[in-house]
Image (cartoon, helix red, strand yellow):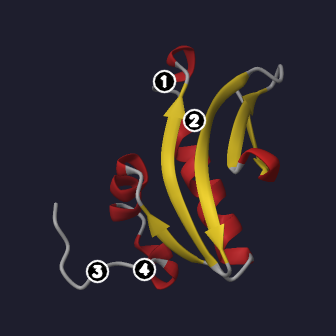
Amino acid sequence: MGIDVRDAPELERFEARDDDGQPAGFVTYQVTGSVIVYTHTEVKQAFQGQGVGSALARAVMEDAKARGRTVVPMCPYLVKWLDKHPEYEPIIARTTKRVK
């Protein structure tokens, strides 16, 4: 199964769709200047456990990197995903004291 992730700026979210164009999940965001806050990730039940969340996370982080944005990860899923992907650390705004 292939997953296509695209920005839907009019809805302030990235959307994931399968090969048939069926909605599989999304990540919501808010942008202010060069800062983007990822607020929520949701994967439809029929697509859970199939890598949709990871595809969304990678796509939103690559988009932020390409646009030179600073990322504020508010979504718990994205925070955990980023803990396993230190390559994005340079573009993440974090407090000096992390709580796990």
The disc, 4 or 1, on the residue closer to the chain's N-terminal end is: 1
Is the residue 20 above or below the residue 10 in the image? above
Q: Report the amino acid beneath label 4.
A: Ala
Q: Tell me, yes or no, if residue 55 can be seen here.
A: yes
Secondary structure of residue under mark 2? helix
- Label drawn at residue 93: 4
Disc 1 to disc 3, how far (Cα)? 31 Å
Instruction: Report the residue marked by disc 3.
Output: 95
Callout in the foreground (2, 4): 4
Query: Residue 35 appears at what percent x and percent y?
Result: 59, 77
Q: Residues within 10 Å of mark 3 (few under 14, many from 20)?
A: few
Q: Quadrant of the N terminus?
A: top right
Instruction: Report the residue marked by disc 2.
Output: 52
The disc, 2 or 4, on the residue closer to the chain's N-terminal end is: 2
Q: Tell me, yes or no, if residue 51 can be seen here.
A: no
Callout in the foreground (4, 1): 4
Query: Residue 58 appears at what percent x and percent y?
Result: 59, 56
Is the residue 93 above or below the residue 38 in the image? below
- Along the line of sight, which residue is nearer the eye, 96 or 45? 96
Disc 2 to disc 4, how far (Cα)? 24 Å
Instruction: Report the residue marked by disc 1.
Output: 48
Do residues under tags 1 and 2 come within 8 Å of each other at their CB atoms? Answer: yes
Query: Residue 85 appears at what percent x and percent y?
Result: 42, 65
Q: Residue at x 36, y 58 (%)?
A: 79
Query: Residue 43 appears at what percent x and percent y?
Result: 53, 29
The disc, 1 or 3, on the residue closer to the chain's N-terminal end is: 1
